[in-house]
Image (spheres, grey):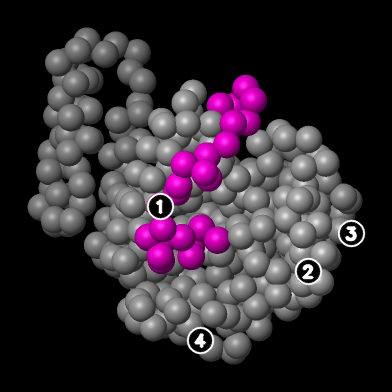
Amino acid sequence: MKLYTAVDLPRSPWLIQHSDKLMLLGSCFADNIGARLARAGFQAEVNPLGTLYNPASVAEVLTRLLDGRRFEPSDIRHFGAEGWGTWMSHSLLSRPTAEESLQIHNERIAQAARQLQESRVLLITFGTAWGYRLAQQANADRLRRVDSSTRSHNLFVANCHHEPSSTFERVRLTVDNIVGLWHPLIQRLSAELPDLHILFTVSPIRHLRDGAHANQLSKATLLLAVEELIGGQQVNPSYFPSYEIVLDELRDYRFYADDMAHPSPLAIDYLWERFAGTYFDGATFRAARRIEEVMQALEHRPLHPESDEYRRFLRQTLLKIEDIQKENPYFESGKLIDRCHTLLNS
């Protein structure tokens, strides 16, 4: 008896190797999968400026990375109690002084720009079609009679930093808006990084501020835009149906967190398994599983940390790390080895 609707997900024609570098940009789903990739020992750069929700903000950050464009002092603003930051980054990057903020932002940009040039996979997650434009720039557009389909994406902020609502104009991007921003970007990526695999997904996280119907309209806009960007191609760019898996295979509120909007840890585990089953070969899957087991072992809190039994457990874990390192020379095991030695010497 079949009690759920399965999402057909054929194995990808290209597969992720454990030695590959990856870049993930976009909504919370990018953060969730990025955290699992890091935990499994992958070299993944995830949202260097913080979580990005709408396609225009993701496009702005990706363009900045391709250009290697640094932030200027004029980009840094004071956001009250949050400190100094930018419209294009999360408040976690805000700092007490403008100088510190400029430094951390440019360090993040430089590191991420290098990672993008070396990456084999770029995962882009769109969360919502709604975006916030600075009101003064939106008004200037009206005076110049700029058509909405050609609005520059740099007018959309990535984070509102708790500024007054009068600072912004809330806009729902159209399919044409999104395709107009992303089609040139995909062409540029294909020209400059021909070996890069671009993978789109739409976040399963529900944006319920305006109600369930408005959320569905937003998600439908994103899905239609991605479909047009992919254009029926099977290799590059491609699509991972995280939204469809949660809505169809996990159609139950037990797969949501307490806010009834974000996927629960169990749902994230399931999405991770579907992702790994689609994009990992056997060797990659086995290496990821072994590294996750080591991570779990080091997170174990023993009842008697001073016991000989626990010390034997740590020495066995250290041997496992060394074995993984021998079989996977690209795996950066230094932090795990240091953690083992610290626990052994404590």
Q: Nearer the viewer, mark 1 or mark 2?
A: 2
- Classify the position of the N terminus by image quarter: bottom right
- Against 258, is 326 above or below? below
Q: Amino acid at mark 1?
A: Arg
Q: Which mark is residue 178?
A: none
Question: N-terminal of the two: label 1 or label 3?
Answer: 1
Judging from the image, what secondary structure is the residue with disc 4 in?
A: loop
Judging from the image, what secondary structure is the residue with disc 3 in?
A: helix
Q: Amino acid at mark 4?
A: Gln
Question: N-terminal of the two: label 4 or label 3?
Answer: 3
Q: Which residue is mark 1?
A: 70
Left or right, residue 32 beside residue 297: right
Q: Which residue is mark 2?
A: 144
Q: Nearer the viewer, residue 121 or 39?
A: 121
Q: Nearer the viewer, residue 265 or 81?
A: 81
Residue located at (59% from left, 31% from top): 78
Left or right, residue 194 beside residue 143: left
- Classify the position of the C terminus by image quarter: top left
Instruction: Evaluate if marks 4 and 1 touch, with contact meaning CB atoms under 8 Å apart.
Output: no
Question: N-terminal of the two: label 2 or label 3?
Answer: 2
Compute the Cα span from label 2 to label 4.
41 Å
Q: Which mark is residue 213?
A: 3
Left or right, residue 84 beside residue 314: right
Compute the Cα span from label 1 to label 3.
40 Å
Report the label total.
Answer: 4
Instruction: Evaluate if marks 1 and 2 touch, with contact meaning CB atoms under 8 Å apart.
Output: no
Give the class, few, some or many, for how many residues have Cα within 10 Å of label 4's Cα (few <14, many ≥20): few
Question: N-terminal of the two: label 4 or label 1?
Answer: 1
Judging from the image, what secondary structure is the residue with disc 1 in?
A: loop
